[in-house]
Image (tube, rainbow, N blue to C red):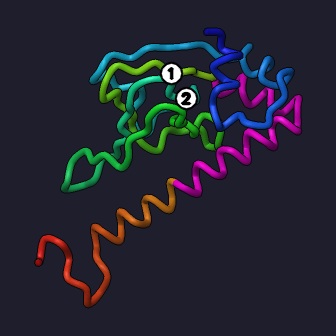
């Protein structure tokens, strides 16, 4: 399957014209990671954006006093590595393949250049990342509520 077909099959790119998908396909390629492979580390320069075609990836952060914690997992059709699109282009978490992963990778710098030359495409891509960020913030909020509990409410481990 070509990068163009893979892009067209991802809901993130729904509504983007074939010509625009062609420009994105020109800056994308497929990549495979074996289970256990660290794709990138928290704090590194963010270089690439990944869309999972097959497999699952753990998004992990280092928590003082608790070690490495998985904050979420992403699977088929989902994106990770969005920091390559959003300044300051530094990874906010680590990503590790939980099982063999095939992903479509878009070079962050080239993706940003394509979006700067095609403002409509740039708007659609930025809107897509805004939706991803909003859902990730909502998920993180729920995790924090679970971690710290609601005052006056018993926590599951206290019951």
Mark identifier at residue 103: 1
- How crowded pointer 1 is (Cα within 10 Å; few <14, some 14-19, many 20+) is rated as many
Label 2 secondary element: strand
Q: Is residue 62 magenta?
A: no
Query: Mark 2: few, some, or many residues within 10 Å (few <14, many ≥20)?
Result: many
At 55% from the left and 29% from the top, the residue drawn is 51
Q: Is residue 154 left or right of residue 53?
A: left
Q: Is residue 98 above or below residue 29?
A: below
**Span of residues in magenta:** 107-135
Percent across and percent down for residue 152 are 26, 90
Asked whether 17 or 129 is in front, the reply is 17
At x 39%, y 37%, the residue is 94
Q: Which mark is residue 7?
A: none
Question: Are the residues tagged 2 and 1 within 8 Å (C-beta)?
Answer: yes
Position of the C terminus, as image quadrant, is bottom left
The quadrant in which residue 98 appears is: top left
- Judged left or right of residue 42, residue 37 is left
Q: CA distance from mark 2 to mark 1?
A: 5 Å
User: Residue 46 in the image: x percent, y percent?
Assistant: 54, 32
Pick whichever, 122 or 108, lies toward us.
Answer: 122
* Residue placed under numbered mark 2 in the picture: 51
- What residue appears at the point 73 percent right and 36 percent down from the top-left corner? 14
């Amino acid at each position: 399957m070509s990068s163009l077909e893979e892009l067209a099959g991802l809901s993130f790119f729904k509504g983007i014209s074939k010509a625009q998908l062609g420009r994105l396909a020109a800056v994308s390629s497929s990549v495979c990671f074996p289970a256990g492979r660290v794709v990138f580390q928290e704090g590194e320069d963010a270089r690439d954006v990944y869309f999972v075609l097959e497999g699952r990836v753990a998004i992990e952060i280092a928590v003082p006093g608790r070690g490495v914690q998985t904050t979420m997992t992403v699977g088929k059709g989902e994106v990770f590595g969005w920091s390559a699109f959003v300044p300051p282009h530094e990874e906010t978490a680590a990503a590790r393949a939980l099982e063999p992963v095939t992903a479509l990778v878009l070079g962050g710098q080239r993706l940003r250049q394509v979006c700067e030359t095609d403002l409509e495409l740039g708007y659609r891509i930025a809107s897509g990342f805004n939706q991803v960020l909003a859902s990730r913030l909502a998920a993180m909020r729920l995790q924090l509520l679970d971690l710290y509990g609601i005052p006056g409410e018993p926590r599951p481990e206290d019951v």
